[in-house]
Image: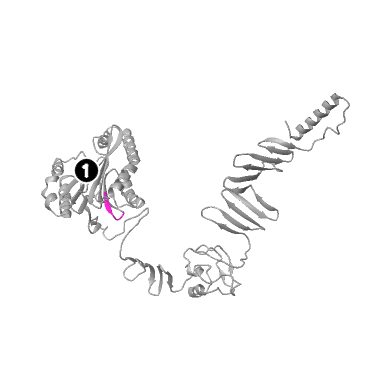
Amino acid sequence: MSIIIGLKDRDTVVLGTDSRYMNAECTEVHSDSVPKIYPIAAIGFLAANGYKLACDFQQTRASEIARELGTRDIETIAEALARESMPVMQQLVASLHAAISSAPGRYARMCEVVRGEALLHTATLIGHDSKGAAGYLTLSFRVVMGQIAHEKVAYFGRARQVQFSAADAVGDSSLARMLQNLGNDRRARDWAPVAAVRAILRDAKSKSAMLGGPSQIAIVDAEGARFMERLPGQDGALPECLGSLTCQFTGTATFQNGTTGPLVQITSAGIVIQHDASNYIQVTGTGIILQGSYSVPGANVGSGYSPSYLASGALASGVTVATVNLPATLPLTILASGTLGTGGSSGVTYGGAIGVGQLTVSGTATFSGTATFTSTGGGSVAIGGGQVVVTGGGTSITIGSGGVQAQAFLAGSGSATAIISGGSSSGYFNASDNSSNQVTLQANGLYFNSQQVVKARQTGPGTPSFTTFGQVQTWASNLLTALQNHGLVT
């Protein structure tokens, strides 16, 4: 169980909680150093109260939603967070049911939760609404007739107001009385916001064994969103990050080993990666500056040549440009200017793929083996072995000494297209249009929509010469048979 205090006064809103984490039945202290207040990007904070599965999800997802929606409105964020939390809450309730069934009579607190007698989960967000007013918003989740229901309580007014969220079944009656009378508490009414929240938390922790550990307090006001009290050792330290982490700041951020060691510095002008004053890389909007020598472990670019030489003109004759793929850290200026393979450097050879930047080559590039150009989005061109193979979209075309070979050819564009493809056996091909009409040419004849219309040439009925009407009928019958065998009539 946790207690979460939200206090709003004019343009200031304060969020406070304790650091104690109890076991599932709230009978034993699991830890007194659990972070419970988490930033929402750089715009506000969230504190969650409930089982770890739901708390972990909301503490991580709130910041992601803020970035994905590009919003500073905590009402919009809370609406999306509540919607996305429903499957998690359903999974949580299913887990509680499974635990209760595995040990009947053991988990009384869980039974209260799944029956809806106690809250399943609460979360309080502080920040600004769509109109820029500071305030707090609490989401509460409860099981109602076997279904998950949630409600929202928000306050963005300017008059001072305080609210709390905690478990329904508050075990200590003195704590319950204190929370019920919180609106009339002189500290909550008159003291400075941070001092009031600090005092209320201290009083609450003294009244319940389920609350404890250091207080955690965050504030959102005219100066921005920031922590006022955090767990010992957290101030000035980077949080542990097992996933993605985005830090937004103004001014300068410097990460340095000691006071004189290597550093990484980020300013509005660019980035500096520095070992010492004589060896650094500076990246700005106008380019990349490298101070000091550059080398690649193993095979390198122009062994013995400084980056300034490589960047200013053609590579010297006989220089080998990598026998393996060039590393991704290769300075772009090496490939961005000058010429490769021309301008008096005809001895330059290419032993591997050039994996950075964009290379423009004029003239003729000569290589041995097979060169393959592959796009990350799919498709490739392979040159080698006396042929060129172009692959894309699950099919390929081969150009070689035997001609041009492909599984199918598409002629025309838009609605005026036709497809020519090979048949299921050798010796014939198909042609079809957009209306699914198909012409098939085989060794034994020509077919239209699977109906044979022309076969091999047939013997005719001979030169017509009649002396009787019966001879006319016989000649005509033979002609019909020949036409039918030829596939011209039915």
Label 1 CA crowd tier, 10 Å (few <14, some 14–19, many 20+) = many
x and y, in percent, of residue 376 in the image = 51, 55
Asked which secondary structure carries label 1, the reply is: loop
Does residue 43 belong to the magenta stretch?
Answer: yes
Q: Is residue 429 one of those drawn in magenta?
A: no
- The image shows residue 416 at horizontal and vertical percentages of 60, 46
Is 325 left, or right, of 221 in this rendering? right
Report if residue 433 is visible in the image.
Answer: yes
Quick check: 17 above or below 330? above
Residue nearest the observer in this picture, 32 or 225: 225
Which quarter of the picture shows residue 224? bottom left
Q: Quadrant of residue 272?
A: bottom left
What residue is rendered at 18% in x and 54% in y? 194
Snapshot quadrant of residue 2 = top left
Q: Nearer the viewer, residue 241 or 397?
A: 397
- In the rendered structure, the answer to whether residue 361 lies left or right of residue 72 reads right
What residue did someone put label 1 on?
Answer: 166
Can residue 35 be seen at all in this image of the molecule? no
Is residue 489 shown left or right of residue 333? right
The quarter in which the C terminus is drawn is top right
Residue at image location 34% in from the left, 41% down from the top: 88
In this picture, which residue range is highlighted in magenta?
41-46
Task: Please state which amino acid type lies under the numbered disc 1.
Answer: Ala
